[in-house]
């Protein structure tokens, strides 16, 4: 039987030691000493080996004091302590010491039962530090954290949360999370539903208003014990500043969207545009983004050298990282024309390289329409006498300053009184429109045509070579003739015009504007005098 007990001790993870009297000399030890401490039986049973020598110095005094208690007790459990193994590692052990007597009076020997508890101690230590770390994170987190029971009862709140709501923990513990004064009445029932959902195992995420002035991003997470929800963790992120910034940005966007703005990349492709710009153009944003601004270009711009120069100047300016300002005529999606005063500014990266362009528009369509109305002949749609006086003055000054030659032509419809008297004023008005538009279509882009009187028109032509004015005048005369408008009361049996020309090409012969006009008028008179359907040039003598 004794051998069976010894066999059990030798195979047990518990080390059994029998000490000599009250000393630390080992009289007997089980074979598992090698497994536990790394020593052989011979080494431990050697007279030079003392168990006290392998106790960690930091633990020695405590253990020594506790062993003394055996004087008053037959059995003691020592505090966990460290012992040095043969391979110089310390392990934690738990020891129970007992006194044994041969008889009721005399103490005979002391026995010890030792277990290796290193793993348990390390686990406990790790758990301690883990809990400490969690507590540190919990207490010092910038987020608001509260621990609840599944039924919504508050168990704990971290320091950040308590400071945020300005409460002591004892004031809120054991209250229902929704039944607290930091929620307004409209939110309490929503919170209650969110907690009920979370208690069923769902992660609930939402934004909430707190204390009537703050905003938090609230996440409610279920905590499980196996398959059962045992806690709810509420984590709130203070997003008040972000909300204020968002409101401010939305406010700015609202303001921006009321302005006429578009943003393009370096190639002029629209990346973004405001709601007001979409409303003005008649296009949806998705119809404009990805397109170039020429989607808005008015067809008249394609037949005007001035506009070609304007677009050229625009790109030359902005690609040099300068702001361009100018007026452009555009068309809406349904073909209506509108005018904008445009300011285009380059947008650069931190290295000064152009990334995009921002265009800000001022809708000047109404002003332009008023201006156009003031300079447009109501019947024919071409420029009127008022605008003729302005442009004539401009041509005259350019010749004075830069010697830029020009020609003034006065055009008159032949036998127009007879046409009006016999065909009626309504037909006469139609003829005036046809003549005006034909003259306009047969002139160059850079030339001007005006209605300056009943059936009288003026034309200003910039010339750069000799006799070009006569070629243009004859072209106009033929174009009217080829309209083949029946006029039985004309010598030619169809509608014709006469043209008087005055060339301004020599500074020495420059006269004032009235004299120039009169000389063009005299040339017209000569053309009529010579049989009408004629072109006549006034020559200075």
Image (spheres, helix red, strand yellow):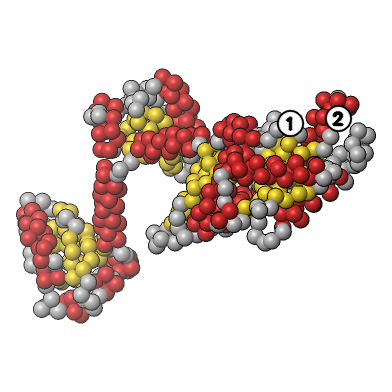
Tell me if 273 is positioned left or right of 535 in this view. left
Q: Is residue 348 above or below residue 158?
A: below
Image height of 141 relative to 348, above or below: above
Location of residue 215 in the rendering, given as x and y in whole percent from the top left corner: 38, 33
Give the structural element (helix, strand or loop) at label 1.
Answer: loop
Q: Badge 1: how crowded within 10 Å, few (<14), some, or many (20+)? A: few
Which residue: 33% across, 41% down? Answer: 143
Quarter of image, res 519: top right
Which residue bears the numbered disc 2? 418
> As drawn, is 103 to the left or to the right of 454?
left
Asked whether 484 or 285 is in front, the reply is 484
Q: What mark, if any, has residue 454 been given in the picture? A: 1
Q: Can the viewer see residue 273? A: no
Query: Looking at the picture, does residue 93 appear above or below residue 420?
Result: below
Q: Quadrant of residue 48?
A: bottom left
Disc 2, SS: helix
Tell me if 294 is positioned left or right of 144 in this view: right
Q: Depth check: 368 or 162 in front?
A: 368
- Name the residue located 91 percent from the left edge and 41 percent from the top edge: 492
Furthest residue toward front: 541
Q: Residue at x 7, y 51 (%)?
A: 72
């Amino acid at each position: 039987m004794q051998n069976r007990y010894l066999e059990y001790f030798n195979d047990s993870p518990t080390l059994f030691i029998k000490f000599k009297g009250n000393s630390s000399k080992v009289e007997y030890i089980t074979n598992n000493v090698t497994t536990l401490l790394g020593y052989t039986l011979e080494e431990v049973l050697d007279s030079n080996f003392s168990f006290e020598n392998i106790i960690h110095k930091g633990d020695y005094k405590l253990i020594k004091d506790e062993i003394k208690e055996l004087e008053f007790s037959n059995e003691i459990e020592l505090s966990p302590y460290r012992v040095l193994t043969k391979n110089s590692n310390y392990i934690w052990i738990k020891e129970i010491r007992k006194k044994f007597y041969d008889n009721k009076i005399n103490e005979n020997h002391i026995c010890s039962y030792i277990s290796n508890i290193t793993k348990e101690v390390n686990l406990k230590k790790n758990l301690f530090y883990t809990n400490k770390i969690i507590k540190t994170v919990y207490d010092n987190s910038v987020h608001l954290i509260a621990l609840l029971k599944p039924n919504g009862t508050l168990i704990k709140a971290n320091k950040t949360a308590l400071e945020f709501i300005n409460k002591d923990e004892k004031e809120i513990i054991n209250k229902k999370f929704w039944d607290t004064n930091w929620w307004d009445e409209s939110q309490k029932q929503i919170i209650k539903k969110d907690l009920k959902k979370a208690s069923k195992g769902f992660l609930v995420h939402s934004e909430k208003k707190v204390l009537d002035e703050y905003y938090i991003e609230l996440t409610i997470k279920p905590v499980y014990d196996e398959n059962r929800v045992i806690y709810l963790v509420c984590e709130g992120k203070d997003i008040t500043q972000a909300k204020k910034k968002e409101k401010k940005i939305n406010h700015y966007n609202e303001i921006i969207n009321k302005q006429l703005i578009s943003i393009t990349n370096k190639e002029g492709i629209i990346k973004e545009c405001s709601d007001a710009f979409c409303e003005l153009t008649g296009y949806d944003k998705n119809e404009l983004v990805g397109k170039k601004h020429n989607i808005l270009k008015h067809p008249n711009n394609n037949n005007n050298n001035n506009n070609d120069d304007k677009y050229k100047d625009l790109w030359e300016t902005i690609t040099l990282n300068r702001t361009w300002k100018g007026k452009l005529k555009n068309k809406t999606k349904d073909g209506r024309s509108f005018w904008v005063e445009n300011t285009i500014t380059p947008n650069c990266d931190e290295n000064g390289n152009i990334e995009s362009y921002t265009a800000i528009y001022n809708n000047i369509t109404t002003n332009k329409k008023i201006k156009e109305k003031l300079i447009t002949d109501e019947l024919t749609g071409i420029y009127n006498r008022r605008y003729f006086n302005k442009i004539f003055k401009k041509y005259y000054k350019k010749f004075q300053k830069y010697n830029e030659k020009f020609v003034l032509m006065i055009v008159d419809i032949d036998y127009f009184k007879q046409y009006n008297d016999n065909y009626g004023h309504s037909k006469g008005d139609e003829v005036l429109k046809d003549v005006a538009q034909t003259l306009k279509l047969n002139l160059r882009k850079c030339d001007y045509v005006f209605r300056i009187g009943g059936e009288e028109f003026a034309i200003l032509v910039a010339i750069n070579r000799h006799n070009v004015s006569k070629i243009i005048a004859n072209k106009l005369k033929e174009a009217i003739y080829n309209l083949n408008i029946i006029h039985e009361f004309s010598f030619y049996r169809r509608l014709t015009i006469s043209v008087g020309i005055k060339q301004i090409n020599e500074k020495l012969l420059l006269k004032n504007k009235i004299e120039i006009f009169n000389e063009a008028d005299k040339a017209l008179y000569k053309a009529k005098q010579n049989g009408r359907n004629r072109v006549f040039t006034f020559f200075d003598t």
